[in-house]
Amino acid sequence: MSVSDVHPDPAASRRRRWLIALPFALIVVVGIGWSFAWNWSAERASAEIDAWIVREAADGRAWNCANRELGGFPFRFELICTAPSVTFAGPAEWTARMTRAHAVAQVWNPRHIIAEFEGPSVLTETSTGREITANWSLLQVSGVGSEGRAERASVAANDYTLAEGGTTVFSARHVELHVRHHPGEAMGTLDIALGFTGASGMALSTPQARTSGVAMAQAAALAAKSIDGELQATLTQVPPFRTMPAAQRLALWQQAGGRINLELARVTGGGGALSASGDLGLDAQHRPDGRLDLAVVKAQPLFAAMAEAGLMPDFLANLAPAMMMAGMPTTVDGQKASSFPFAFRDGRVMLGVLPLGKIGPLY
């Protein structure tokens, strides 16, 4: 019998066709199922956004988008908000407006949201028309939350500027802010970390009539004396995050026994450094209560750099030698420094054992 006389087994042929078709069929089924699951999750996310907007309105913050789009299929959820705005209710109503917001969350981790905002942002006081404008080259916000509440949040901005009436009152090459609920503590206990590099203040506002060459020279000089800073602190008994006057918020914080544990605050520039730590609160008469320990290394070049950057009045920088004479000698990171241990008790300010005077209520 020749090979040509052997007929193929029909059952074997059918099995081969199934082996080829089955993977494609599974892909189609999985794709359809994933599409249904994504759309269901997207509708749920949209409903959660609407519910969050309602909760925010109850806390005095009315959010709005000129146009809202939800996309990102198949592996992400993307929310694009055109012309976002938020109005803060209260005696002095303010409204903040931006150009565009783009938020993204991965399907497998929807609790972690990353967003980018396009500037500028204009904050307007409704009653007076007063405007404060912030701008940046890149602004990113990330947050992790559950049950409609944020557990931690971070903000990072490049080339940040803050201006009012055409005058830049603060700018920085880079700014970061991180806030989280302190692990194992009540919801009102927050850890805060802040950092900035290349900061300058309103004294550096330069008239447009100046030549570009002069402006470039000033920028180079500023870069050589860059003012950088960082802060790490823990706040306890923080009131609920709803719109209220500052005095009311401070009163609630004081009544609950709130404190600021300042682990580190540090400003560097011109080869010098100023650092601070302490524990502060308010007494029943709304006066500072606690301690604040300052240490200064190379005060003269530090203050001169801060004055040149517009972050300190010139006259105060000129008083650096006299101010340092009041400090106590110490060392910081192996360098000679002057320390200033301030104490605030019963409306009085002490430098070590030396009484400096009285201090009144803050509000």
Image: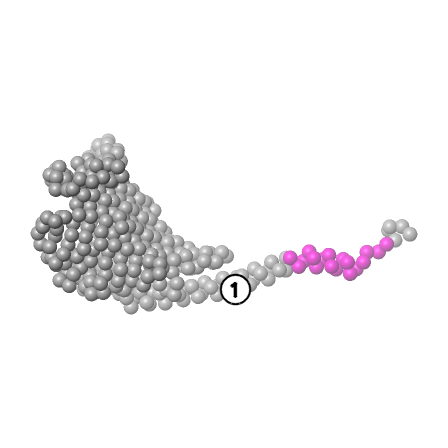
For label 1, the SS is helix
Mark 1 belongs to which amino acid?
Answer: Phe
Q: Residue at x 23, y 33 (%)?
A: 221
Disc 1 crowd rating (10 Å Cα; few below 14, some 14-19, many 20+) is: few
> Is 69 or 28 nearer to us in this picture?
28
Residue 13 colored in magenta in the image: yes
Q: Position of residue 120 (x, y in %)?
A: 29, 50
Q: Residue at x 15, y 42 (%)?
A: 327
Q: Residue at x 17, y 45 (%)?
A: 340
Q: Residue at x 34, y 47 (%)?
A: 138
> Is 161 or 245 nearer to us in this picture?
245
The part of the chain drawn in magenta is: 6-23
* Residue found at the very far right of the displayed protein: 1
In the rendered image of this protein, does residue 332 appear above or below residue 132?
above
Residue 23 image-quadrant placement: bottom right
Residue 25 image-quadrant placement: bottom right
Q: Which residue is mark 1?
A: 36
Q: Position of residue 263 (x, y in %)?
A: 27, 50
Majority secondary structure of magenta residues:
helix
Residue 212 visible in the snapshot = no
Image quarter in which the C terminus is found: bottom left
> Is 128 or 60 nearer to us in this picture?
60
Residue 298 visible in the snapshot = yes
Q: Position of residue 311 (x, y in %)?
A: 19, 43
Residue 61 colored in magenta in the image: no
